[in-house]
Amino acid sequence: MFVLVIVFTSCGTQENGQLLGVMNRPTWKGINPYGMVYIPSGTLHIGPSDQDVTSTFIQRPKSISIQGFYMDDTEITNNEYRQFVNYVRDSIAMMAMDNTYEGEDGELYIDWEYELDWSDEMVADMFYQGDEKFTGKKELDVSQLLYEYQWYDWQGAAHTKNANRGDFLRKETASVYPDTLVWIRDFAYSYNEPYTRNYFWHPAFDDYPVVGVNWETANAFTHWRTKLWDDFQAMRGDGVNSEKFRLPTEHEWEYAARGGNDNAPYPWGAYYLRNTKGCLLANFKPGRGNYPEDGGLYTVKADAYFPNDYGLYNMSGNVAEWTSSAFHENSYSFIHDLNPDMRYDAREDDSEAQRRKSIRGGSWKDIGYFLQTGTRHWEFQDTTKSYVGFRCALTFLGRSINDFN
């Protein structure tokens, strides 16, 4: 008995008196996100790869280092984004039908085991009523599709002393349905109504990049995508949350676009927009406006043309892409050389200049200059365009995906 008492005492919380670290920690295997490719850590020389046609010198040469990350191999497509829209639609309907349960924390959660009945009177208000009906059709009022979420202002917390945690919790509400009217609004005296009526919902465009989504809504999508994965992890009992899906920073995007070819002016590494056979290598506005010459009058499928050496499609052309970075003409002069990012979360009372966000890659309606990997451009964060989409990034937790030591 005396020996047993000694043995059991030694198996207590003191780990035999040795510094062994906390035992029985969860096993971390990471994730290999579907539809994403791994971009290894590396060094990038940013700056102009050709003549600065605007003569603004906003792309000063600089050497930077980037942490490894995952990136979507294509722009987010209409059908992928529709999963987000349908989730918001169904969530609102389930709450209206009171198909909920109270969790241990006292909050209400949707009980997805209930069947969603669209004939229920409780969801009637989600459809256009009275004078807003068109030819008597029962159509969803998309203005009601709002996604509410919360995020933490790490930048503000890091630069404030002795502040309360609640001071940096931010709540956002984003309208999630794409602005389909951009196809008319963006082009004066131009007939593009068929795209307004069909581009987002018609099956013909399922694999085309989603457009009409502003920077704020793109961030809401990344929050929902993270929640989608976290809920799946919780369901299978992993216990360890993954890193968060997000928009890539401006320089992560440029690093990924070059495909490991430093100083490459285009994702395919060459100095020209055509290959040796004279075929155009991206979807843009060739020459003085021969839009269909490259194979696409407007956008094309998200996986059209050849990918770069990282396996990323349409990093130049098709649609320009939102990044998480704020745009400042002189930011290259003061950003850090380690994972540089110019971040500013604009408030409603901020000036228009403070609401600019960097977009990269050029689009189907842009000339070749904007397709260069080093070319910088911007749009206002609350602006929707028929030529701006996005793709997601996910930071890799560790030195390298090949590091097994």
Image: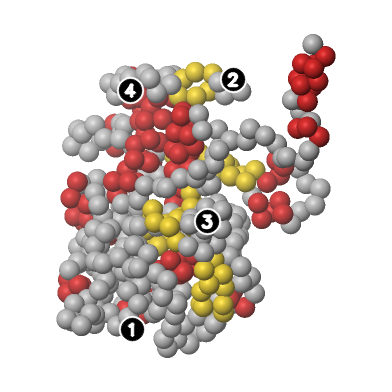
Q: Nearer the viewer, mark 2 or mark 3?
A: 3
Q: Earlier in the sequence, mark 4 or mark 1?
A: 4
Q: Nearer the viewer, residue 324 or 188?
A: 324
What is the number of the mark on residue 403? Answer: 3
| Residue type beneath disc 3 | Asp
Residue 128 visible? The answer is: yes
Quadrant of the rendered image containing residue 91: top left
Residue topped by disc 4 = 116
Which amino acid does the dot numbered 2 rest on?
Answer: Glu
Q: Who is closer to the viewer here, 93 or 105?
A: 105
**Would residue 213 appear left or right of 220 to someone viewing this image?**
left
- Name the mark nearer the viewer: 3 or 1: 3
Q: Residues within 10 Å of mark 4 (few under 14, many from 20)?
A: some
Distance from disc 3 to disc 1, alpha carbons, whole Å, reads: 34 Å
User: Percent x, y for residue 325?
Assistant: 53, 63
Ranked by sequence position, the earlier of labels 3 and 1 is 1
Q: How is the image coloured?
A: secondary structure
Q: Amino acid at mark 1?
A: Tyr
Residue shown at 20%/63% (left/top)? 191
Q: CA distance from mark 4 to mark 2?
A: 24 Å
Find disc 2 in the rendering and name its residue.
Answer: 104
Name the residue: 38% across, 41% down.
84
Per the image, label 1 sits on a secondary structure element best described as loop
Q: Amino acid at mark 4?
A: Leu
Between 21 and 195, the one nearer to me in the picture: 21
Whether label 4 touches label 1, CB < 8 Å: no
The numbered mark at residue 271 is 1
